[in-house]
Image (cartoon, rainbow, N blue to C red):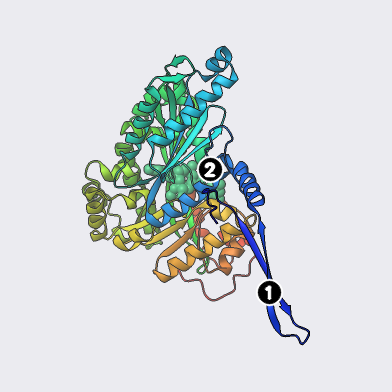
Amino acid sequence: LLSRSGKEYAIEDSAAPIRSGTGEVIGCVVVFRDVTEKRNLLHKVAHQANYDALTDLPNRYLFQDRMVQLFGQARRLEQAVAMIYLDVDHFKKINDTLGHPFGDLVLKEVGRRIRSAVRGSDTVARLGGDEFAIVAPVELSSPDHIAILTRKIQEVMALPFQIEDQELHLSASIGVAIFPEDGPDPTTLIRNADIALYHAKEQGRNNVQFFSPLLNLTVQERTEMETHLHTALGMKEFEVCYQPVVDLDRGTIVGVEALLRWHHPQRGLVGPDRFIPLAEDSGLIIPIGEWVMETACRQALEWQNLGNPSLRLAVNVSALQLTRGDFPGFLNRCLQITGFPSDCLELELTESVLLQKSGKVTEALVRLHAMGVRISVDDFGTGYSSLSYLTRFQVNTLKIDGSFVRGIASHSGNAAVITAILALGKAMSLDVIAEGVETVEQVRFLKNHHCRLLQGFLFSHPVSANKIPEILAKNYRKGEGVLSGLGEDRSDGEVPPI
Ligand code: C2E
Ligand code: CA
Ligand code: CA
């Protein structure tokens, strides 16, 4: 309701009938109440809980909420979400020399400027102190959008600040992490953007740094590992280990996944999570990946010849292997040289590779399919989980990420994700492998939900090649071998030979 002076009022009304002696309605009483005050107070309380009092930007709570919404939307629309973490350089000095009230005015102006630099649909928040954050959806087709955005923010920050009668020149350090690659949930994404920000500051101020798993290494570690990585292949320091994939229905091992290990002369055994990012960064992943493929194909053929003719081999393939050089050409030669049957080879790719719209990736996937090679989506469920590429490319297998399997008991959301993936696999006639199976309870859950392909420490850790024949031999006899430890009754039907 607007008054004549243009002021807005909130009015609540209620009505009651007036009856005559005979009960006939002869009128009514209408009561109007001015609830402007009450409503304003409610708004104010709600606002205070969600917004930062100084800058009037969303606070951490509202920000996390918006992130969750954006992640959901990004999953549906096949977008990425950039999390940009910003910190005003040398802000402490301003506070110390010019006082807190002055510092507050600076922060207010910083908030205004960032707001002006981004799109209306992007969320800008103040997370505390002199830290601001922006979340912005990014189309996968325009990855330089993030660089443009960070440059714009740096530009508005570089303009002189005129506060009271002081002129200040400021800059900001910026860390960027991108959903879903750098973190599947708000907490991880904020943490990783913060790590990137820390490194941006370390490089001197006014810097932008994108998150990479490499940032978890110290500079010294990184240079040292990089130098060694160049010679590791020649020095025969790599080993391919294998982890069995179990078929619960058949009670047999139906495949193995090749997992790379590095026996570092000083550091001992180094896991792939530590050195694969380095190998990707330096391009060394190409020769290393080719070596893994050839070694694993030769090895798996030997096992097939021991009486497991349809044993499948899964090999992890980096995005870089598909986008650089001629991967299908290499693989074709590799299969010829080794004699490994293409229909037993499964390439494990991540969703982000399958979502790339680059012509090169599409062409490679089409050629690989024509060669008869199988395609598997690794870590399914942690990323976009978009369905479009499942039909665009001939995908054969989904691998449920181990984090969902490990969370079966603790969080019903994980169980829901698993059942959804299994239903999807069934509807699209895809194989589904559950990774990271560690307990009998998890097996029971998966079995009850008709997930028959399992992989995890419960059955076997990744082991050296020479241990595999023994594991393969065990599962010929029903009730023995990998499944015997489960205490499950395996008397259901005959176990066919693999
Ligand atoms: P991934 O492909 O998701 O491989 C599964 C990882 O989970 C492996 O770690 C495996 O050892 C571990 N794992 C298996 N079962 C369990 C379990 O029950 N519980 C737990 N907690 N973990 C389990 P790993 O061997 O350290 O490999 C890490 C990642 O490195 C792999 O993740 C893969 O993305 C990458 N990688 C490994 N080998 C290669 C390779 O030859 N080429 C490329 N490009 N990447 C590789
Ligand atoms: Ca894998
Ligand atoms: Ca995986």
Check the image and report above or below for 90 versus 6: above
Relative horizontal placement of residue 136, taking residue 195 as reference (left or right) = left
Q: Which residue is mark 2?
A: 63
Can residue 53 be seen here? The reply is yes
Q: Which residue is mark 1?
A: 28
Q: Amino acid at mark 1?
A: Cys
Q: Quadrant of residue 483?
A: bottom right
What residue appears at the point 65 percent right and 49 percent down from the top-left corner? 37
Q: Secondary structure at mark 1?
A: strand
Between 495 and 161, the one lying in front of the other is 161
- Residue 469: x and y in percent read 46, 53
Q: Secondary structure at mark 2?
A: helix
Q: Amino acid at mark 2?
A: Phe
Which of the image's four quarters has the N terminus? Answer: bottom right
Of tags 1 and 2, which is closer to the observer? 1
Contact check, label 1 and label 2, Cβ < 8 Å: no
Between 247 and 227, the one lying in front of the other is 227
Q: Quadrant of residue 210?
A: top left
Say which mark, if any, is on residue 405.
none
- Which residue, as the protein is rendered here, is positioned at the far top? 97
- Which residue, as the protein is rendered here, is positioned at the far right? 21
- Residue 167: x and y in percent read 43, 15
What residue appears at the point 61 percent right and 59 percent down from the top-left corner? 412
Which of the image's four quarters has the C terminus? Answer: bottom left
**Label 1 environment density (alpha carbons within 10 Å; few <14, some 14–19, many ≥20):** few
Q: Quadrant of residue 279?
A: top left
Relative horizontal placement of residue 286, taking residue 472 as reference (left or right) = left
Check the image and report above or below for 248 versus 321: below
Sequence order check, earlier mark of 1 and 2: 1
Between 341 and 400, the one lying in front of the other is 400
